[in-house]
Amino acid sequence: MDVQHDSHYDVAIVGYGPVGQALSTLLGRAGHRVVAIERWPDFYPMPRAVHFDHEVARILQHLGLRPDNSDAIEPYDAMYAWRNADREDLMLVDWSGVGPTGWHTANFFAQPMFEPQLDELARNQPTTSLLRGWEVVDIEQPAEESSEPVRLTLAGSDGTKHNGERRRLSADYVIGADGANSFVRRTMGAEWKDLGFYFDWLIVDLVLHEQQVFDPPAWQLCDPARPTTIVPGGPGRRRWEFMRLPNETIADLNQLDRAWQLLQPWGVRPDNATMERHTVYTFQAKWSEQWRSGRLMIAGDAAHLMPPFAGQGMCAGLRDAMNLAWKLDLVLRGKADETILDSYGPERTPHVRAFIDFSIALGRLICITDPAEAAARDARMIADRKDPNVTPEPAPSPRLGPGVQRSGDPLAGTMSIQPRVTGATNAGLLDDVVGPGILLTTAESALDDRRRKALNDVGITVVALGDAPGDGVVVDDTAAYTTWLASHGAAAILIRPDFAIFGSVSDPADVCDLVDDYLTQLGQTLATQVPVVAG
Ligand SMILES: Cc1cc2nc3c(=O)[nH]c(=O)nc-3n(C[C@H](O)[C@H](O)[C@H](O)COP(=O)(O)OP(=O)(O)OC[C@H]3O[C@@H](n4cnc5c(N)ncnc54)[C@H](O)[C@@H]3O)c2cc1C
């Protein structure tokens, strides 16, 4: 779609990496006029993310990029091993099988193939426009309470046909999905909280000419002589990561010849492999202390950075996109008060913090170059392995921080599961049959029509578990929902459109109260059925 100068949009998304692409799809699909602005004329060419977890697989399912139907993605079904220089196992993390969302616990992907697939989903939205080759260089935010839009100035990027040009556009809201050096974050005046974790690693992506078996396919070599990561890089691809040693410079390491030299002990050479990309990254651990300022918000690397040892940076960004998109959608449609946007940062910060801490803990195990320190670590971890009480978790499952949740509810802010169900017209994973945003009850609920309609208006479908599928009734194919609800003593559970649980009730008679609480927190008034108008 051609974009006119001085156009106005509901939302301007600055930056079109995976998080900007996901937001463009989510908000475009909700019918909002969205413009995404990206300074590069094409996709970012350097190696980055290769792994995502089962919860992010569910987000991709929701976006329309099914992990079981993409040639950019392969599920993982093995241990993730941590070994010392003598190749002894220090830790085995079970990444096999399927997680509670119905998708594989771990998945590997090739970002250069994955991003065009996300991009296609965004481009398919008739109300979403993409401006490539333009950099946002100025943002004027209107005074608080003003109904004026945010005004953005764009400069044509060097080396593109727009070089030297300027254009202006306006938007009701601006989301900075503009990466680590986010211009939007700096415009907001938000400060980084920096944990001071800095390590340089050379990252190398390869296509091997002949397939080789790697057992396990993903592992960390905790060798103080050269800490190394060896993982899949998506279908047909492999990734090696080599830590910079104290006696090396970044310039020493960031050389094509050096990359091949480091790969030699692994039997990987130019005659049996093609190197797609290599570069040195400085891993960092930071998060922004503020995620929203008036009409400006940030998401993804603009809001947080973590070392990639748990493969969770982009995952966190896609979780941001899910959290923000449904709230902003309701605000733009006049179905929720603008104040629900205040819950975005407080909900996401403790969650992302848990993954930053986890990534650092893993990093502290591998980024050791002192032989004595490494020997002490090895002894400690081998002893832990023999301790039946120590079972390494695949990843943390933190709850959201305080926000749009039922107060005092033990399930509030945790993630819902997604087993298979059979509905009136189809069977499959719950979101495929019903869609996200659900009030799930164990028996047909006595909700009045006004509450049902009010829930519908804010994107929540009422569904009961039953013996036979029907209108508003699904069969719990594997009894997983029944078991899950029973384990929490819950008779009904309200799942937000981002799969997070708003709250639950143990007595079916309290379901109206649960619904009223939700609507009140959105700023809706059931009594009058008059939606709050966006501020
Ligand atoms: C070596 C490495 C390995 C990693 N491995 C994993 C992994 O396995 N799993 C995982 O989940 N994560 C991983 N990550 C993290 C992951 O790559 C990032 O978290 C993710 O790419 C961030 O996406 P984003 O959309 O927030 O930002 P980006 O992808 O950085 O996109 C931001 C975009 O904004 C654009 N931009 C910036 N400023 C402007 C402006 N003023 N105007 C217009 N455009 C602008 C930039 O050009 C860029 O395209 C890894 C990272 C690294 C470095």
Image (cartoon, helix red, strand yellow):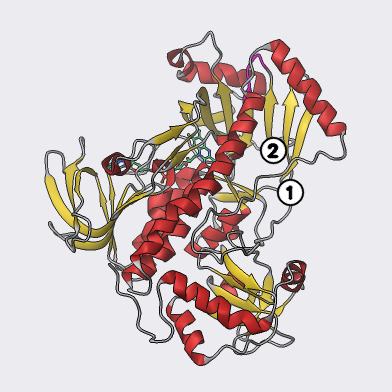
Which residue is most to the front? 408
Q: Is mark 2 within 8 Å of ligand 1?
A: no
How many neighbours does mark 2 have within 10 angstroms: few (below 14), some (14-19), or many (20 or more)? some
Circle 2 — which element? Answer: loop
Q: Dividing the image into four equal quarters, which quarter contains ligand 1? A: top left
Question: Would you say residue 85 is visible in this rendering?
Answer: no
Residue 146 as seen in the image, left or right of residue 467:
left
Name the residue nearer the viewer: 265 or 494.
Answer: 494
Name the residue nearer the viewer: 204 or 249.
Answer: 249
Give the Cα distance between marks 2 and 1. 11 Å
- Look at the image and tell me in which quarter the C terminus lies: bottom left
Circle 1 — which element? Answer: loop
Tell me where residue 270 appears, x and y as whole percent. Answer: 54, 24
Q: Tell me the number on the disc at residue 96.
A: 1
Tell me where residue 526 appears, x and y as whole percent. Answer: 44, 83
Residue 481 as seen in the image, left or right of residue 447:
right
Q: Which residues are magenta?
A: 224-228
How many neighbours does mark 1 have within 10 angstroms: few (below 14), some (14-19), or many (20 or more)? some
Question: Would you say residue 387 is visible in this rendering?
Answer: yes
Question: Could you tell me which residue is drawn at 87 percent across and 35 percent down?
Answer: 387
Hey, which quadrant is residue 268 in on the image?
top right
Q: Main secondary structure of the magenta part?
A: loop
Q: Earlier in the sequence, mark 2 or mark 1?
A: 1
- Amino acid of disc 2: Pro
Tell me where residue 421 appears, x and y as whole percent. Answer: 68, 75
- Amino acid of disc 1: Ser
Question: Could you tell me which residue is drawn at 67 percent across and 16 percent down?
Answer: 224
Q: Tell me the number on the disc at residue 217.
A: 2
Tell me where residue 187 appears, x and y as whole percent. Answer: 26, 42
Question: Could you tell me which residue is drawn at 50 percent across and 24 percent down?
Answer: 198
